[in-house]
Structures are given as structure tokens and as C-alpha cells.
Image (tube, grey):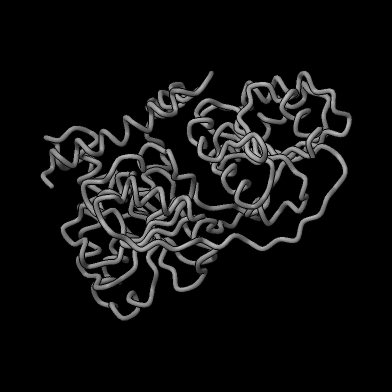
Amino acid sequence: MELFEIEKYIRELQRDELSFKNQSINSDEKFILKKRKNVAVSFGIAWHIILSLLDYFKLLSLVTFRKKVVSNKRIVFTAKNFCTESEGKLQDRIVKPLFTENILFINQSKEIHLTRINDQRVYNIGGVVKLISHIAFRRENRLMRLFRSYSFVNDSIIRYLKGSELYILWFYDLNSLSLIFSKYRNNVRLIEVQHGSIINYPPYIKPAPVKIADIFYVKNQPTIDYLKTHLCSNFTAEYRLIPYPKIERKFVPGLHIFYASTVEFNGLHPVFKDFLKRNTFDDLHVIIRLHPRERDKESNFISELASYNIKYEFDHSQNWLEGNTISNMIVISPWSSSLEDAFDNGFITITIDPVGRERYKQFIDNERFFYSDNLVDTIQLIKKNI
């Protein structure tokens, strides 16, 4: 594809995703985007750029002169948001169900420097991309400067790889797209591992103009069927299932609600706050699971929850399915992919936002999966029928 065609495709992906999220009620997405845009380049980012330069040249040396070592590695492009943190150490949470060894982690973030994941070394390239975007490709707009900077860095690496497996955790970010459209694309096997819900999510709706990945690891058969008739309808790919953890759960008396936050609301969703305000269930127990980008805002949620007379706790487990053993728990979220995980694992599930209703419409049956803008009534109905 020509560069202008690639730019058009990237802009369509970004436009469709933002339009989808803006369907939400009372979302703070625009505020968050503006806030991030106005943040000045800090000393930490400058230091990240310096360290990334060192990492980049070490990585380049590794793929150039130690090809046998690299050939045995699974190369995973990741970022902090795809990890959990325990006692100050980062653990991968996406590829963990598939493998935990022989990984070469590459951090694609332009701002956040990572040293180790799974106690394994991380190579940072995002700082180099940021630097190049400021000094090269000046005739391009900001979007394409970043895309071409990612392409320059990644091409310099994968040109030396032959048959290596490259894992991406979402295809529609600039780093992944630079790999997909790389002139050295045929050197490697490109593999996407599902990190969120795919069905009805904008980047996956329209057929792609090129082959996105050789292999897709996904959570369930409906997702495979969806990809075949949407994103991947113009090409063939291999599909494999990500195994869910096998957990023994038990019934615990009481109304147990697991709330998974969505970052765009910068706090609890209005429908959930209304439920807590009107709550009349004496046995209510709320478990809050914060979105990865909100885990440093727990104190904000505590302040919000202080307005309600409820029993609550925060879920800090690396995998919420492994960390929660209550079989009669009800899972609620605006549109977190936890809803799909919950449905796949037999939990009663409720989406409380129009975006979630659209995103999960194929699951909503008003028996195990509900859409609700009045949780008091919906939960009373559920309690009556179970």
C-alpha cells in the first residue's frame, strides 16, 4: 500500500474507535485526551529517551550478531498497561496463559521506561521513536511522523529476523501497524493475542486491506467466527484459543458484586453510583477491580465510595478470574472486557453503558447477560430468578 493509503486507514481506525467511545453517557474521554496532550515533556521522559537509545543499540546488536539466541525467543511487544504489579515487580498478564519462558520483551511506550517484566530484561524502543519523530520526517504530520519513526526502528530490527514469532497485543496502535506494513513483514510470524473484547469493537469491524496477523489467539469461538467475517474476511489466518484458568468456586451467601472500572469515566460510572446511593440490600458486598490505567487512583475511588454505606474491597489479584472464588458473584462494568470473561466463565453479567450495550449486544439475553440503566430493578429481578 502507498503511504497515503496507510495514513487513511490509520485515521479511519482512530476515528471509528473514538466515535464508538463517545457514544457513552457522561464520559470524561475528551477531558482525559486534552489533559494528556497538554502535559509537558518531563525529565523522566528525557531520561527514558536516553535509556531507550542504549536499549535499542543493545537490541540491534543482539539481533545482528547473536541470531541463534534470538531465534529461540518469542518477541513480545508490550507496555506497562499490559502488566500487573506485585511488590514493585511487573508481571505480564496477557501472554501468561500461553507461555512464560523464552520471551524477549520490547516496551513500545514513548513515555514510560520499564526495566524488567517477569523478572526478565525489557528492551525499550519507545524513547527512540519519540526522539526520531522530533528530528526526522519533518514534512509529515504528527501522526505519520510517529508511524514512520516506529517503522524505522522496527524495520531496523526485524530485517535481521528470519522466522521469529512477534507477538502484538492489539493491531491498531502505531507500533503494531508499523510491523504489519513493514517491508520485512514476511521475515516473521506476526501473532496477535487478544487483550480486550474484539466482537463489535470498531478496529475489528471492517475488513482489513492487508493481512493483519498470521495467528490470532482469542478467548472463545464466537470471536473466531467474528474475525473471519469482519477484520480477517479478506485473508486467511490461523486461530487458537487462550485457555481460561480452571478455578474451583463455591456459593457464598449474600449479594456479591464485582465492579470492573472503565478508564474513560475517571471514577465510578453514574449508573453504578446511582445504585450505591439507592441500595437497600443489607448483604451487599462490592469488589472493585480498577482498570490498569487507574490503579494509581485507588484513593480517588475510596473517596468516592466513602459517600455510600457499603462493604467494599479492591481486587489486586494478577488475574481476577483466579483471585475470585465466589460462584454467585455478579459482574458489572460500563464496557470492560471483564464482562466477556465473566460470561465465558458462567457469571451473571451486566453492562451499564450504551457503549457496552452495543459492544456486547450478541451476548445480551436477559438471563445471564443484561444491559441496565437501573441496577436496583435489574438486580432485584436477578435475585428473584436465581
Q: Toward the viewer: 88 or 219? A: 219
User: In the drawing, does residue 245 fall left or right of residue 51?
Assistant: right
Please indicate, yes or no, whether residue 297 appears anywhere in the rendered image: no
Vertical side of 22 occupied by 130: above or below: below
- Name the spot of residue 201 as percent of width and height, x first: 42, 38
Q: Quadrant of residue 147?
A: top left
Relative to 34, residue 210 above or below: below
Q: Which quadrant would residue 296 be assigned to in this image? A: top right
Residue drawn at the location 72% of the way across and 30% of the way down: 302
Q: Is residue 129 visible?
A: yes
Q: Looking at the picture, does residue 316 appear above or below residue 236?
A: above
Q: Quadrant of the C terminus?
A: top right
The residue located at (59%, 44%) in the rendering is: 338
**Residue depicted at x 57% and y 40%:** 291
Q: Nearer the viewer, residue 255 or 370?
A: 370
Q: Please tell me how many numbered marks the rendered image carries.
A: 0
Q: In this rendering, would 259 be left or right of 385? A: left
The residue closer to the viewer here, 57 or 250, is 250
Q: Position of residue 172 (x, y in %)?
A: 33, 44
Estimate the x, y position of residue 93 in percent, counting from the top left.
Answer: 54, 56
Residue 3: horizontal and vertical position, in percent? 13, 42
